[in-house]
Image (cartoon, helix red, strand yellow):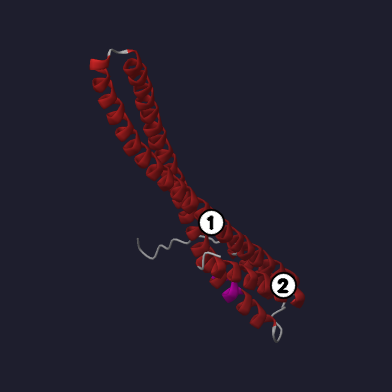
Amino acid sequence: MSGGTFHVHGPHDHELEHAAQHAAAHGEAAPGGGGMINQIAMFTAVIATVGAIFAYMGGATQANAGLYKNNAAIKKTEASNQWNYFQAKSTKQSLAEVSRDLAPADRQAFYQAKIDRYEKEKKEIQATAEKIEAEGKEWDKQSDAQMHVHHRWAQATTALQVSIALAAIALLTRKKWLEYAMFGVAAVGVAIGIAAMAHV
């Protein structure tokens, strides 16, 4: 590894290098020209770094949304199982009621005890099913909230990428209004990122 270096090019590196070489080749590093190149190069480096952080946060919130949605699906399945169990108890209770009504008087107490037991078990099963359903709805709600934040991070990242593209065009064309547009779009991207951070 004697003196060897490893460099990963960002999305704006090529444009910056090309613009700098173009300016040097044509003697365009006039007063203020080099300053503009340095200013935009520094700006794009900072914005690219912020954009990478935003992209990471967007990926993390998307993963969370998927995990929470999976938890919601599991809870819905558990609740469905409980309601099926409840239905089975209801069927047994109905059969016990028919049996009680058709049974001789000395056997009616036996079936009534079964009916009372099934009724008690049904109430417990219903309470469990409703609790699990509520947990599933809460997981769904959390998943939706994470997806909303994910969209905010994606919007912020996109705005910063557009800003970097404007920076490259500003370097190549030397248009001051493009430089202002670059700063404006970057400010919008950062503002959306702050909104994502605040879960707005």
Occupied quadrant, residue 47:
bottom right
Report the residue at 28% width, 21% height from top: 111
- Magenta residues, as a range? 41-45
Front position in the image: 134 or 13: 134
Whether residue 171 sits left or right of residue 67 in the image: it is: right
The residue that appears at 34% across and 22% down in the rendered structure is 92
Q: Quadrant of the N terminus?
A: bottom left
Label 2 crowd (10 A; few <14 / some 14-19 / many >=20): some
C-alpha gap between disc 2 and disc 1 = 25 Å
Left or right: where does residue 10 sit relative to residue 187?
A: left
Q: Amino acid at mark 2?
A: Ala
Residue 150 numbered mark, or none: 1
Looking at the picture, how far across and down is residue 121, in whole percent? 30, 33
Q: Amino acid at mark 1?
A: His
Q: To which quarter of the image does residue 113 belong?
A: top left
Using the image, determine if residue 30 lies above or below residue 45: below
In the displayed structure image, the side of residue 63 where residue 48 appears, left or right: right
* Residue 179 seen in this snapshot: yes
Front residue of 196 and 134: 134
At x 35%, y 63%, the residue is 2
Residue 166 x, y percent position in the rendering: 69, 67
Is 78 magenta? The answer is no
Q: What percent of the width, then of the height, locates residue 138?
A: 45, 50
Residue 181, label in figure = 2
Q: Magenta includes 43?
A: yes
Q: Residue furthest front?
A: 105
| Residue toward you, 148 or 61 | 148
Say which element carries label 1.
helix
Between 196 and 11, the one nearer to me in the picture? 196
Asked where in the image residue 41 lies, by quadrant, the reply is bottom right
Q: Earlier in the sequence, mark 2 or mark 1?
A: 1
Task: State whether residue 48 appears in this view.
Answer: no
